[in-house]
């Protein structure tokens, strides 16, 4: 399959290519080869690559500054968000090198980076501005909410697409922005250190809640409810009417069941709404953060020589005393 646009989660790709025993040049080369070789059969001369980055700190700046001290930081919602994730010190220079490699290659190679947003924040608004067949290159299942007939996710090789049917087979409901976000908000996500409502033993022991949750997710997906509609229903719930209603939707059934245990110390409605605020896309216009420059053959030749011909074995890529730092 040939794609008009290929969106790449660059931090994710860097970790997929990462090898502790390799130098940063060797790992950056592997990332470039993925773009130039692995993607070759799936692109045309007009295919646009979109490189999406998490915040990258400036030279010599503390890593935490890029992730925590910005107006849209999720750590202000929950200071435990991604607190268990570690960022290897070598990853940042690898990403800077990869970004510089594609800096002067014209409008078909675009980078999206800022101090304000994570890579997946750009996807939703970006997809509203592009069309055709689109590939999503990531293992981050947050991106599953964008899968459609024209949008395919590739968590591994191009021979292993993760399609709508793949998601249905794994989770039992169709992926939409609302259903995937709600699933993660309810059940949590260990990789992002997001705690779901079933960490509460009382909720976990009430088996009917889990059954109603599954039916609700199918309903939200099939009815194509927007995330705003779901949030509104959870926030402004009219439980008095639900008590007297004989016929409820699956979403109303879910709200009704949660209300029965709402008096617990950990209010399940607040947990879900806070988690949605962590998970939902924050960026309204990805093109405000796009970076690309006109093609510069001389610069590109120098970058290719530096990355592919330089004998970096003579320059060990290590730093005395450096340790992995906490990714927040």
Image: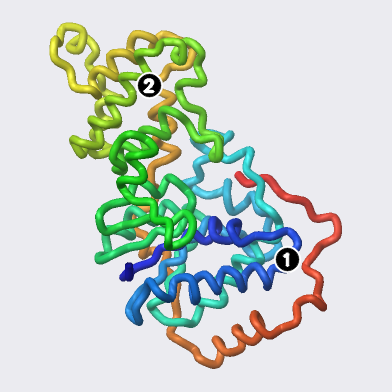
Q: Tell how many labels.
A: 2
Q: CA distance from mark 1 to mark 2?
A: 47 Å
Q: Looking at the rendering, which quadrant does residue 173 occupy?
A: top left
For marks 1 and 2, give the one nearer the viewer: 1
Say which residue label 2 marks.
269
Quadrant of the frame with the N terminus: bottom left
The quadrant of the picture occupied by the C terminus is: top right
Tag 2 secondary structure? helix
Label 1 belongs to which residue? 22
- Marks 1 and 2 in Cβ contact (< 8 Å): no
Q: How many neighbours does mark 1 have within 10 angstroms: few (below 14), some (14-19), or many (20 or more)?
A: some
Give the quadrant of residue 227: top left
Tell me residue 175's x, y (percent): 31, 42
Q: Residue at x 51, y 45 (%)?
A: 73
Observer-nearest residue: 286 or 41?
A: 41
| Residue 247 at x, y percent in the picture | 13, 14
Residue furthest bottom as drawn: 298
Question: Where does residue 319 sit, x and y in percent of width and height?
Answer: 81, 62
**Residue at 63% in and 46% down:** 327
> Considering only vertical position in the picture, is 222 above or below 11?
above
Q: Is residue 73 left or right of residue 282?
A: right
Please identify the residue farthest to the right as the structure is shown.
Answer: 320
Q: Can you say whether 49 is above or below 144 in the image? A: below
């Amino acid at each position: 399959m040939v794609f008009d646009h290929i969106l790449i989660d660059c931090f994710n790709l860097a970790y997929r290519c990462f090898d502790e025993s390799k130098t940063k040049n060797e790992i950056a080369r592997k990332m470039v080869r993925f773009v130039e070789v692995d993607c070759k059969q799936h692109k045309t001369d007009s295919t646009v690559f979109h490189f999406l980055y998490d915040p990258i700190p400036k030279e010599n700046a503390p890593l935490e500054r890029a992730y925590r001290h910005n107006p849209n930081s999720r750590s202000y919602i929950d200071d435990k968000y991604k607190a268990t994730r570690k960022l290897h010190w070598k990853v940042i220079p690898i990403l800077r090198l990869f970004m510089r490699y594609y800096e002067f290659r014209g409008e078909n190679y675009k980078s999206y980076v800022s101090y304000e947003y994570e890579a997946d924040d750009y996807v939703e608004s970006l997809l509203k501005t592009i069309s055709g067949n689109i590939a999503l290159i990531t293992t981050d299942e947050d991106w599953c909410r964008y899968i459609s007939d024209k949008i395919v996710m590739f968590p591994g090789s191009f021979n292993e697409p993760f399609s709508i049917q793949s998601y249905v087979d794994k989770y039992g409901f169709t992926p939409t922005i609302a259903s995937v976000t709600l699933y993660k908000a309810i059940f949590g996500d260990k990789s992002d250190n997001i705690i779901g409502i079933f960490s509460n033993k009382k909720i976990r022991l009430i088996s009917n809640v889990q059954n109603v949750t599954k039916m609700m997710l199918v309903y939200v997906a099939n009815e194509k409810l927007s995330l705003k509609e779901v949030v509104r229903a959870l926030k402004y719930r009219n439980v008095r009417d639900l008590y007297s209603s004989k016929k409820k939707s699956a979403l109303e059934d879910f709200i009704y069941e949660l209300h029965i245990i709402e008096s617990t110390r950990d209010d399940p409605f607040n947990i879900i709404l806070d988690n949605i605020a962590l998970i939902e896309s924050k960026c309204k216009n990805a093109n405000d953060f796009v970076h690309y420059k006109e093609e510069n053959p001389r610069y590109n030749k120098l970058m290719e020589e530096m990355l592919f011909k330089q004998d970096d074995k003579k320059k060990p890529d290590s730093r005395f005393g450096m340790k992995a730092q906490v990714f927040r």
